[in-house]
Image (cartoon, rainbow, N blue to C red):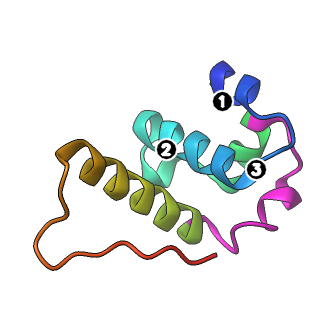
Amino acid sequence: MTDAKAAYHHGDLRNALVETATELVRTSGAEGFSLRDAARTLGVSANATYRHFDSKSALLTAVASADYVHSVNIGGAHPQGASVQWRN
């Protein structure tokens, strides 16, 4: 987790939360972490997470989406009929 904290410099909290949550899911499982855990790991207040994600479920959706995009980029092609659209 030190890398996630070191990489975050009060710039892109949304992506820092997604990266941190991804690591927390890998180590603790989807049920084993909270928004507070992600905030604590990054050294920000728990309330700061809610500026980007309404809930743990919203953060997990972003983690899954990022993982999907990463998988597609590695594979080099979208699964048939799939498209990726970003919404902020």
Q: Residues within 10 Å of mark 3 (few under 14, many from 20)?
A: some
The quadrant holding residue 82 is: bottom left
* Residue type for callout 2: Thr
* Residue type for callout 3: Leu
Bounds of the magenta span? 42-56
Residue that label 1 marks? 4
Is residue 47 inside the magenta stretch?
yes
Residue that label 3 marks? 13
Disc 3 is placed on an element classified as helix
Question: What residue is drawn where x is 49% and y is 44%?
Answer: 22
Mark 1 and mark 2 residues within 8 Å of each other at the beta carbon: no
Left of 81 or right of it: where is 24?
right
* Residue type for callout 1: Ala
Viewer-closest of 46 and 74: 74
The quadrant holding residue 87 is: bottom right
Residue that label 2 marks? 22
Distance from Cα at disc 1 to Cα at disc 2: 11 Å
